[in-house]
Amino acid sequence: MNAYELVGSAWDAKIQKNDLEGYLRRARDCQAAQDVLSRAAGEKYGYVTLEVYAVPTLMGCASEKLAALGSTVDDLAR
């Protein structure tokens, strides 16, 4: 649920035109978020990459965590 909370905060930051980089940095355990950071750092207008990919990437990370948790719960229930 923390991952979804992070998504909500990042979405709010996007709407308010705040720094999205920090939200991606907080998702240390999400390789996709780290990939977006690396890509943005290598681009002339990296803020555009952050603006476009931050929230969807964080949502993907949160979805993956929830799916993994669901799988673990299913395994334990067997």
Image: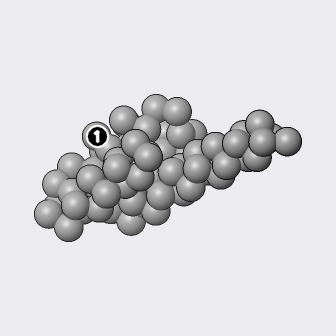
x, y (%) of residue 59? Answer: 47, 58
Q: Is residue 26 above or below residue 55?
A: above
At 70% from the left and 42% from the top, the residue drawn is: 73
At 44% from the left and 46% from the top, the residue drawn is: 1
Q: Is residue 5 above or below residue 48?
A: above
| Quadrant into which the C terminus falls | top right
Disc 1 residue crowd, few under 14, some 14–19, many 20+, Cα 10 Å: few
Observer able to see residue 36: no
The local secondary structure at tag 1 comes to: helix
Specify how the rendered protein is coloured: one colour
Seen in the image, is 49 located left or right of residue 69? left
At 35% from the left and 48% from the top, the residue drawn is: 6
x, y (%) of residue 43? Answer: 40, 51
Seen in the image, is 45 located left or right of residue 68? left
At 58% from the left and 45% from the top, the residue drawn is: 65
Say which amino acid is labelled 1: Gly
Residue extending farthest to the top is 28
x, y (%) of residue 16? Answer: 14, 63
Residue extending farthest to the front is 77
Observer able to see residue 69: yes
Give whichever of 39, 71 is nearer the camera.
Answer: 71
Give the quarter of the image for residue 51.
bottom left
x, y (%) of residue 72? Answer: 72, 40
Count the marks: how many? 1
Instruction: Please name the residue that numbered disc 1 is placed on.
Output: 22
